[in-house]
Amino acid sequence: MAENYQLHRGLYELVKGVPQSEGNLMADWLGGVFSAVDEGRPIVYNQFTIFSELMVALDVQPLCPELWSVVSVAADKYACCESIDAAQEVGISPELCSVDKTLIGDIMLDKMPPPGMLMLPTFPCDNAKIGYQVVAHLTGAPIYFLDCPYWMDDEEAMDYWVNQYKGLISFLEEHSGKKMDYDRLKEVTEESNRCIDYWLEGIELLKTKPLPMNGPFAAGFMPGLTSLGRPTATAAVKASLDTLKARLAKGETAVPEEKVRVVWFYYPVFWDGGLSRWMAEMGAVIPVGLIGYYPAEPIDTSTPESIIRGLARRSLETPMGRQGRGPSDIWIEDCLNAVEQWQGDCVILAANPGCKWLRGMYGLFRDICRERRIPVMVWEVDFLDPRITSEEESRTRIGQFLDTVMER
Ligand code: SF4
């Protein structure tokens, strides 16, 4: 219905005129979603740790609900509040992550196109598992869980996981009415390999000190969720990488005087887009963050089996997915590694109230950092709901912390 989803339709109208050469992926994605809605084609909800290659190969439209919310608050910082409140008013626990309350509320208020099917792995959190089940219940759409073993350190566990992935292909085929063409999947995976190579190169280049461009280098994340495997996604990531390389070649830096390198090992505060710019004015830059930390490997595309195995294996490394599927050590070691490799002076961690599994780890992490004399700041802020902690409060807390780090 043309009158629905006005915020996102408005955004689509705004961005669709941007030249394709600039990698207008948001327009591609939103345009694809609205075409599917208007033509009655099914939409697949892909949870935020599932990248898009299978959907691109099958030509079914992905809609990552978490990305839908991020786009909402980037346009209007209070955009998710109504949905969060609506979910709570019908009895959804306030303790559920705001991401999932928004998802449920968006469906109840018809602010997001309903899914034809949903899919998610059993990581990284219970919130997503509950939120998606509620949506499946409200809409009647079929749901597929990729069951991930807790320990993934032997081949038997990997075989099990690969079988989960094969089950996902069958699920998508059954509910889309389409058949996977493995030649097409090979093409898509090769394109995806190229795109990810560019992304990884950008992530690596941000180890440079002083930083040539404020990070993290997250250029591959949105393509990952919307269009990975299409040439447009590759072109967009390459364009970001080219910009970064050009800055490096000219000796340009993110800030005139780099005073602190901050490892931001969480998502950004999506409604507070000016926060990192404000930090940069203090001389604080972000070389690496959770979205720009992706130890992915290329996929062998020689056979359908190697492709599926490679996609399954790589899906275990997506930002947040990688850290949320086993012992706390993965997240802790990744963050410590980020400090070392990207020469971080300190770590800032947003404590999203609903993200209980991760907040539990922060205490363990802080103890280790105390021993290693790495300054850590944890502050409570909800990345979709600006009513929890204001912009001003965040700046006061972060400003005081950065002053302390600079005085060391
Ligand atoms: S913020 Fe944390 S709890 Fe919320 S959806 Fe993401 S991983 Fe799950």
Image (cartoon, rainbow, N blue to C red):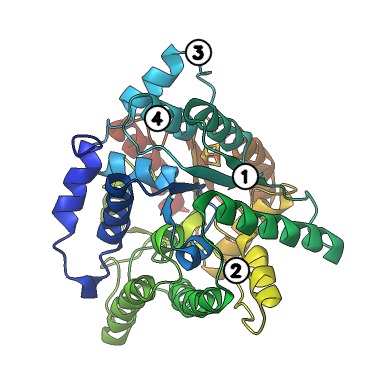
Residue 295 tag number: 2
Q: Are marks 3 and 2 in contact (CB under 8 Å)?
A: no
**Residue receiving disc 4:** 107
Q: Are marks 4 and 1 in contact (CB under 8 Å)?
A: no
Q: What is the three-letter code of the residue carrying label 4?
A: Ile
Q: Is mark 3 within 8 Å of ligand 1?
A: no
Q: Is mark 4 within 8 Å of ligand 1?
A: no
Give me the C-alpha separation between circle 3 and circle 2: 40 Å
Question: Marks 2 and 4: which is nearer the front?
Answer: 4
Question: Marks 3 and 1: which is nearer the front?
Answer: 1
Tell me if I can see residue 123 in this picture. Answer: no
Q: What is the three-letter code of the residue carrying label 3?
A: Gly
SS for callout 1: strand
Seen at 27% across and 69% down, the residue is 23
Seen at 31% across and 23% down, the residue is 82
Give the camera-side residue of 345 and 267. Answer: 267
Seen at 46% across and 78% down, the residue is 191
**Residue receiving disc 3:** 91
Q: Is residue 322 left or right of residue 91?
A: right
Q: What is the three-letter code of the residue carrying label 1?
A: Tyr
**Residue receiving disc 1:** 144
Q: Is residue 398 left or right of residue 12?
A: right
SS for callout 4: helix
Give the crowd class for mark 3: few <14, some 14-19, many >=20 residues within 10 Å: few
Q: Are marks 3 and 1 in contact (CB under 8 Å)?
A: no
Q: What is the three-letter code of the residue carrying label 2?
A: Pro
Give me the C-alpha separation between circle 4 and circle 3: 15 Å
Seen at 28% across and 47% down, the residue is 273
How far across and down, in percent of the image, does residue 271 sit?
Answer: 31, 40
Give me the C-alpha separation between circle 2 and circle 1: 26 Å
Give me the C-alpha separation between circle 4 and circle 1: 19 Å
